[in-house]
Each structure stands twice: as structure tokens, then as C-alpha cells.
Image (cartoon, coloured by chain):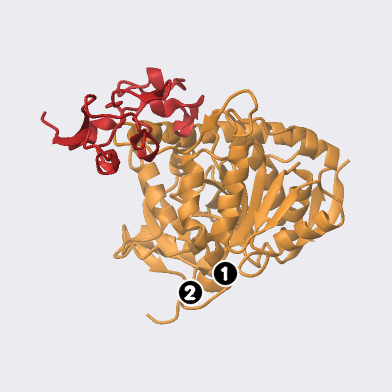
Chain colours: A red, B orange
Amino acid sequence: MIYNGKNLDESVTWQEITTAGTIKGGGTSKQFKTGDWRSHRPVIHMEKCKQCLLCAPVCPDSAIPVKDGKRGEFDYDHCKGCGVCVEVCPFDAITFEKESK
Amino acid sequence: MAIKERLSGNEAVANAMRQANLDVVAAFPITPSTEIPQYFSQYVANGKVKTVFVPVESEHSAMSACIGAEIAGARSSTATSSCGLALMYEMLGVGASLRAPVVMACITRALTGPINIHNDHSDAMAASDCGWIQLHAETAQEAYDQYLMSFLLAEDPRVQLPVMACQDGFITSHAVENIELLEDEVVSQFVGTYEPQDWLLDPTTSTAFGPYDSPAYLMEHKRQQSQAMRNALPVFKEVAAKFEQISGRKYDVIETYCTEDAERLIVLIGSSAGTAKTVVDELRSRGEKVGLVKITMFRPFPREEIAQALSGAQAVAVLDKSDPMSGIGGPVYADVCVALSQSNRRPLLVNYIYGLGGRDVRPEHIEQVFEDLKKDLRDGGWKDDYRYLAVRGE
């Protein structure tokens, strides 16, 4: 049976899929890309960013990684485009742009 | 050594519950539940069992708690009846699809309305397509035995499905009968310890149960669940063979009574089988070739066994103790028709709705069915196969 989300895709057969969809192991949501239904994406303009870090804690999807006291590029695999970071930024360093296919 | 006792069906199952090494019993402690949780709570209070008893606020919660306990890795059970079972409806499907092997004693009683608390099968039949295995008992002895067998069946890795162990309300649940109980140690060894495949409290891994199943995956899970239900039939035969070794009592998915050379047969479920056997004996003594098929396992439906048992008969009456108002007959009749659909030899088939809301089922009623079948055969068919037995009015 395929317990690990990494190996699970839409080719799985009924014989291989886990009983009742049970998932083993923690942190499996990382393997599940939820950013693909975003209609708008936040874009960070680093020249305006003062690294005040007000944006990172308000992100509901932890899609703003912070390392050594500085925020980095958005994690677009998991950002759902809610725009909260855009609203909270005091320096207009984040713009909200329509997703184009 | 077996223990000879005289017990009601409820007392018998409460004893089985005491013996079954249960970790959790969650039940709604007042009506419409049965006396079973009442007796069991006394065992808990008197220190006879180590089971955690959860007196929940509703049947919906009783089933939820049982499912939660099973997921955690605990063996759990409950008991209910009638509208109590109806209140569990949502959770019945959840438990089955989560593959939580809960064992439930179901005391079959009418689903209101009109308001009625007496025996028929409308509660169990309304819940028969929720993914639960369903066993039906004729006597208190069978109720006790089948409840105990249910654990091995439910927890078998090839099955892993919940079981409803049913007996007829009042007729079996409240009437006191002679019964043979097994010794505590014998039962304890028979049911063993619950060893789930996956369980929430497993310290070696973290596990998520019951995640959202998108359209890309749900059908695979349903196909898997369907296989588990199909597996339950042969697994029950294995469990019954094991049970025979400790009890000397034989069980199968159906019971046939004088069917071998029978021209006319009755198919039914539950306590009325006793009455029907008496009538078969009486008619046989007068040289009439009649017989009975009692269905013990209703889910999964014993398709091949039924087709085999009915293949030699000329006319068959299927008796249903519920009417789902489908407009074409009862649920047992519908499934018997499916079972026979691929047979080369199909007997004349009729359906009787009988014994609703606790209406007495007397030998003369069963005799009338056999008499009707004789007339149908003489007439070479019937005008109406969807009939009510012993109802007033033309």
C-alpha cells in the first residue's frame, strides 16, 4: 500500500491505495500543492522591502519563508493569493497581480 | 464446560459484551436504546469489566465515540434499536468507509410512524446499505453466538468493516430462553486482542485518518470497500468453523430446513423462522413438500447460496418484515430476485410483507403462505407478487 503522499498520484489503483485513505507520517501537506487555484499572486519588490517582517506572520499558509531574520521569495506552491500580505505591507513593497495562465 | 442459563436476548448479548474484552462501550443509556447498555453499565459499576463506558447524549454521539475509539486502536461496541439506529445514520456510513470494525447489537424494532415500538425489521433494513455487515439471529442463543463471532469477522484484515448483530425486538430481546453460555476464558481466547492495521495512538508513526477524498481517489476507495464486503462472506464461514470448535454450534450464511426435495419454500429472516419450522414439520407430516430458508447474513447478501437453495423449488415466497415503500416489494425480495436473476431455473416468486409493528406471526399465517403458493402453482402464475400477509381487508 502507498502510505507516503510523495508516491501517491492519480495512477494509484484500488488495490494499492491505503485503506480508508489513511496517511502515514507527518508534514505531508508540503507535498500537496495548493497554490494552483490562485487567481491573484503577491509579488515582492525587494528594493522597497524594509524587512519589517509584518507580512510573514499574517500569511495563513506559511508561504513567506523567513531565514536569518529576513523574508525571502514567496512559496508559490502553497500561496493561495488571499492578499493579506499585500494589505499589511506599510511600504507598498508587495503588489497584487492577476494570474495569467 | 458450557454454562446452562435462562436469559433474554438482551441479557445474553450483555453477557457476550462482558466477555468480549471490550476497551470502549459508548451508548445512549435510555430509550430507544435497549436494556443491553443498562446491564453492561452494571458490570462496569461492579468492576466485572475494565471497559470504559461512555454514556453519551445521543445515538449519533454513541456511534461517533465508537468510531473514534476504533480509530484510536480500541475495540468498541454499542447497542441500539429503532429510531436510535436512525439517529446514527450519518455515522454508520462514516464508520464503514473509515473501515472501523465496530460491533453493534441491533435490536430490530419498527421505525415510527405511525408511532410504534414493537418488532419489525424497518430499522435494520433502512440501514442495510450503509456498508455494515448484517447478521440476524432467530433465538437468544444465536444472538449471543453471532455477537461474539462478529468481532473476528469485523476485525479480520481482509474485511475490516463494522458489523450489526441483529435480533428481533421483544420477541427475542425480551423473551427468556434456555441458553448455553461459553466460559469467560474460552470467549477471551476466541475473540483475542484487537490488533488494528493502522491506529491513531501507534507510537511508532503519526497517522491521519479520514482525509478529504477528491474525485480522483474516492472511487478507488469505494471499490476497495466493496471488496472488503464481498470478502466478508467467505471470512464468516471461516469464523463460524472456528466458533463451532469451541461451542459445537454450526453457523452458515443461510440455514436451510427441509429444502432438498421441497416444491414450495419460504425465505425469511429472524425469529419467525422458529414458527415457520413448526409449520414445515406439520405440513411435512401430512406429506407436503415444503421447506424454509433462513437468511443469517443479510449483508453481504449470500447470492450464490440463495440461488443454490432455491434452485430446486417450484414456488418461493419471500417474507419481508419491513416495507420500504418502493412500490414493488420488500428488500429481501429484491435481493432474492437479483440472486436468482442469473439462474437457469427460476421458481415462481412472490413477496409477502408480514409482522409489521409487532403484529403476531402465527403458524396459520405461515400455513396460508404455503397454501397460497399451491394455488399460484395451480393457476400457473400470479396476478400480484407484492402482498401483505394477514392484513385486514380484501
Instruction: Name the outermost residue toward the bottom.
Output: B393
Whether residue B52 is visible here, answered yes or no, is yes
Residue B35 lies in quadrant: bottom right
Q: Quadrant of the C terminus of chain B?
A: bottom left
Residue at 41% from the left image edge and 29% from the top image edge? A29
Q: Tell me whether marks 1 and 2 sit on the same chain.
A: yes
The tag earlier along the polypeptide, 1 or 2, is 1
Whether tag 1 and tag 2 are in contact, CB under 8 A, the answer is: yes
Residue B38 lies in quadrant: bottom right
Residue ID for mark 1: B361
Picture layout, residue B313 above or below residue A41: below
Residue B350 lies, in percent from the top left, at: 38, 58
Picture layout, residue A42 above or below residue B50: above
Residue B63 lies, in percent from the top left, at: 57, 53
**Which amino acid type is marked by label 1?**
Val
Q: CA distance from mark 1 to mark 2?
A: 9 Å
What element does badge 1 sit on?
Answer: loop
Residue B349 lies, in percent from the top left, at: 38, 54
Residue ID for mark 2: B390
Label 1: how many residues lie within 10 Å, few (<14), some (14-19) or many (20+)? some
